[in-house]
Image: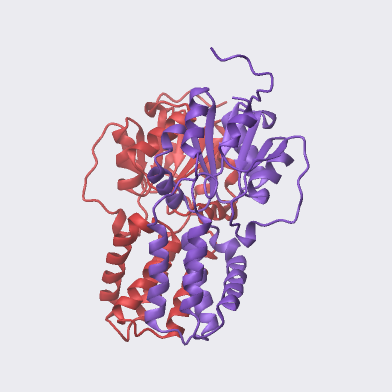
Chain colours: A purple, B red
Amino acid sequence: MKSHNPMKKHFQVIAFDADDTLWINETYFRASENAFCQLMADFMEPSLVQRVLFRTEVRNMALYGYGVKAFILSMMETALEISQNKLSGELMAQILTLGKEQLNKEVMLLEGVEKVLQQLEMAGQKVVVVTKGDLLDQERKLHKSGLDRYFHHVEIVSEKHEDNYLRLTEHLGVKPADFLMIGNSLKSDVLPVLNIGGHAVYIPFHETWEFEKTEQKVEHPHYAELEKVSDLINWLGL
Amino acid sequence: MKSHNPMKKHFQVIAFDADDTLWINETYFRASENAFCQLMADFMEPSLVQRVLFRTEVRNMALYGYGVKAFILSMMETALEISQNKLSGELMAQILTLGKEQLNKEVMLLEGVEKVLQQLEMAGQKVVVVTKGDLLDQERKLHKSGLDRYFHHVEIVSEKHEDNYLRLTEHLGVKPADFLMIGNSLKSDVLPVLNIGGHAVYIPFHETWEFEKTEQKVEHPHYAELEKVSDLINWLGL
């Protein structure tokens, strides 16, 4: 019989971010980006190509949103800009192929993820996913991951702002104070959740897209940083 | 005082499709497609370009899904295929511009839509939206439409299959028999809903994308076809 743990934390709902929290994502974006910068090397030095691409992605964010399709479109636009429309059809076709290959990538779970989900399931914990990005692509990754069965609910949002989290907690019938979000982005997974009165655990991934970076240091009674997802079980006191 | 109408139909939830049911959509796709076929006229006869584009879209459907970003990517792929990679950078840039222009189009409500939503609101009817396509683009259109306030819930799905409708009715806490779906696609808005025991009203739009066409004739006690959205009020007996 398991003894009562006085340090046990209880949350009605625990929500996981998906990309770079459950599975590898940024690594694939960086690989496509590097391949793209190499493809463009005849026109511009690769590190500069990367700067122009980032600027294009930020400029297109409001129109295209997150996800691989948006990324392909921004690579195309960058390529045309950098080459002053001198891009060959072969190069454009290679950019399209980069995108398709990325969409078809395997889903590689981060270490310890499945075990943690199993332990939460055994503890009777309600667990959900909150991810932003492309609807179809995120659904496909979740399906490929084999993790679907652990999640009571999957929420795919166009942005992770405070109002999205508020709507989600309302929808799940949970008070923010009983809601814990776990993710690798301070900007998307931590700060907006703390701002609505929720709890957040930050588990950094070794790569972070510049757009998700924030200078802000977080100090908050509802906040913790863990090194890896498997540390969660101890932290929860399970 | 309004007298009791013995013909009054009652549904716990009435769901509207969005594209070509609440607002014009297909017209914009057809306009971009025509512009694209003209851009490609030096390589191939426009009506043939259209055939190749459709084939490309269908081939990419599982990977890209619905929506404008998928459409732009398929146009680019078609252009490269048709030109055997001899496409000029100027033409590629024009294709990207076609896509951006389409994403920035105004939202034009179909005639009578707002009045019907007002009447349903006055009748205390719970109304939701069920639409497929790109998350961000559909949210943006809903916001631009000014109709957000009429909807209790907005569901954006990657596909409109039976399991999506079942999940939605469960989520809304409504039995399929108390659920009415209204839309312009027999394939997406009518047949799957009838198959799970729901009710469906078909309001054809004058343009239908080939992918949404079905040869099937519908005869079902839970089915009706109306000419325009404003006929709904009479049909409901309100």
Above or below — where is B77 with respect to A226?
below
Which is nearer the eye, B160 or A90? A90
Residue at figure coordinates x 76%, y 46% from the top left? A218
Residue at figure coordinates x 27%, y 65% from the top left? B55
Above or below — where is B184 with respect to A66?
above
Above or below — where is A20 with respect to A97?
above
Which is nearer the eye, A62 or A71? A71
Which is nearer the eye, B233 or A212? A212
Task: Estimate the x, y position of residue A85 in percent, counting from the top left.
Answer: 49, 85
Task: Estimate the x, y position of residue B229 in percent, counting from the top left.
Answer: 43, 46
Identify the image quadrant of residue B149.
Answer: top right
- Of all residues, the one furthest to the top in this rendering is A1
Above or below — where is A33 with respect to B182?
below
Quadrant where the C terminus of chain A lies? top right
Q: Determine if residue A152 is in view.
A: no
Tag count:
0
Task: Estimate the x, y position of residue B10 in percent, counting from the top left.
Answer: 44, 27
Task: Estimate the x, y position of residue B231 in percent, counting from the top left.
Answer: 42, 43
Q: Determine if residue A83 is in view.
A: yes
